Amino acid sequence: MPELQPFVVDGKMLSAGIQPHDFVVKNTGYWMDCVNARPSVLGVVPKREVIAPFTSVELTAAGVVTGWPYPQFFVGKGNTLLADASGIWLVNWGASWWSIGTKVVTGTAAPTEQKRWHFVDLGNAWLATNNKWVAVYPSRQMIPGSGWTAQYLKAQDEISTACEFGGRLILGGFNNVDMGMWGTFGPNVVWWSNVGGGNAFWRWLENAGVEITSDEQEEVFERNDSGYLFLPQVGTVHRILPLRSGIMVYGSDSIVYLEPIAAPITTFSQRVVKEFGIPGRDFVDGDRLGHVFVSFDKTLWRVNANLEFEKVGFKWIHGAMAIEYYMQTAVTFDEHDREAYVYNGNLPEGFVLGEVGMGRIAGSPSSFTNSGSKYTDDPVAMKFSSAPANNMAVTLGPFDFDTAEVKRLSMVEVVSLVPASTTQLTSVITARVNYRHKQSESYLQTGWFTCDKVGRFSPDVSGTEFVLEIISDNLDVAIGSVKFFVMVGGKARVKEYAA
């Protein structure tokens, strides 16, 4: 009998990740499923370790209420904050780690849907909105006159979203909010402050007894440095995010890109870039280099800094989920690794979209800090896990090895990659094979096999289609390739398949 040669699924094929389509394609390298795994150029790698800034004991002791999507953790240039549904705490920087400080904003109960805080960092000042309450901290330099000390303010103003752009505070999606001398705004309005953002806080300073004089208001008008746009084509403004040299406005009816114009007055040009919108304010996240969002039809998209849109797919993630549950979906972007987490509190796991494909993890982060900190090089985030999961699993297939004939799968080799720090395999790799003879039949399963020291096991089963399940008992291993040794029609299958 001739020596069996492998059908190889190499790292390039494995980097495709979970299949994005509604239909299964054979021999592609797409994963059928996974747990705590994500694709990379190496193949299948374990989930990225995310560091939680506080333990559950610390959160409980401080009175922080947990439960998706709370709490959230924000690191700004001048302030570090922790937030739950009903309030915001200052966070102290110690010699070696953070500690929870004083609760400075209270009584800000969130709406029942799309309730994450959107945090805007303005140096020593900040603003946060959860679409029901606005909490602000203006720096002393932003307050007209003298004799008034900066303090934390809140108001029950329904403003959907906010961001910083070019030193300005941008607000969007108002629900009949009185913005003083600018008038009362509705859901299709985007408003911008002057450079420095000071006049953005006038709405809430006046509530606190700070008088904004007519001379000060007239000066703002004369400078033509602050203003607003009505965007009727957008519908309701759900989210505004900086992108490249402009601002992307994600609305219920369309997506519009705003670019600044300096002369003759400060304003923005507007361009509709997509004729469809998103369901809610937390269905998109990103930074100035790119965004990831979920459209109304439950399809995942991304857009880069060149305004190039990619329809990623994965409509099946939310499937036939009822609208009241689907509306709890949130996208969280990690600048550290440029990965987007897609999570819904009604799903057992979350999904993570990297630059090469999609993986699945237990739970999901609710908010990431700015990249890096003085305490750790790992990304830091408040995270949620549906169950303890220290193993990694991936399901590959189906494979028919480019022929509809009956085949005998004699042996499988799982090629593992080990950490450079240990240079040796500490994981136990187990695997089993699903097989069938007709597409109209259900798959049969072998028992579980423990791979030997070179990653091989011998299922010795026949069929026309095969699916491989692999489990590692820890997260210290990656899978670089898989080799299938098959015989077709009683003869050795001599073929190497590589993308």
Image: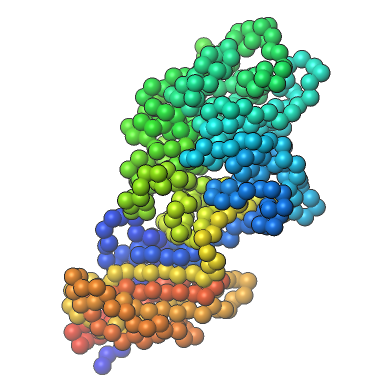
> Which quadrant of the view contains residue 79?
top right
Vertical position of residue 464 compared to residue 42: above or below:
below
Residue displayed at 42% across by 69% down: 394
- Visible in this render: residue 122? no
Residue displayed at 19% across by 80% down: 406
Vertical position of residue 262 compared to residue 316: above or below:
above
Residue displayed at 34% across by 85% down: 459
The percent coordinates of residue 418 (x first, y second) are 54, 73
View extreme (bottom): residue: 1
Residue displayed at 71% across by 54% down: 58
- Visible in this render: residue 359? yes
Query: What's the image's color scheme?
Result: rainbow
The N terminus sits in image quarter = bottom left
The percent coordinates of residue 264 (x first, y second) are 51, 11
The percent coordinates of residue 74 (x first, y second) are 64, 43
Q: Is residue 36 left or right of residue 314?
A: right
Vertical position of residue 364 compared to residue 129: above or below:
below
Q: Is residue 212 left or right of residue 241?
A: right
Looking at the rendered structure, the number of numbered marks drawn on it comes to 0
The C terminus sits in image quarter = bottom left
Question: Quick one: 417 or 499, which is closer to the camera?
Answer: 417
Q: Is residue 81 left or right of residue 406?
A: right
Question: Quick one: 485 or 224, which is closer to the camera?
Answer: 224
The percent coordinates of residue 92 (x first, y second) are 76, 45
Question: Quick one: 322 or 427, which is closer to the camera?
Answer: 322
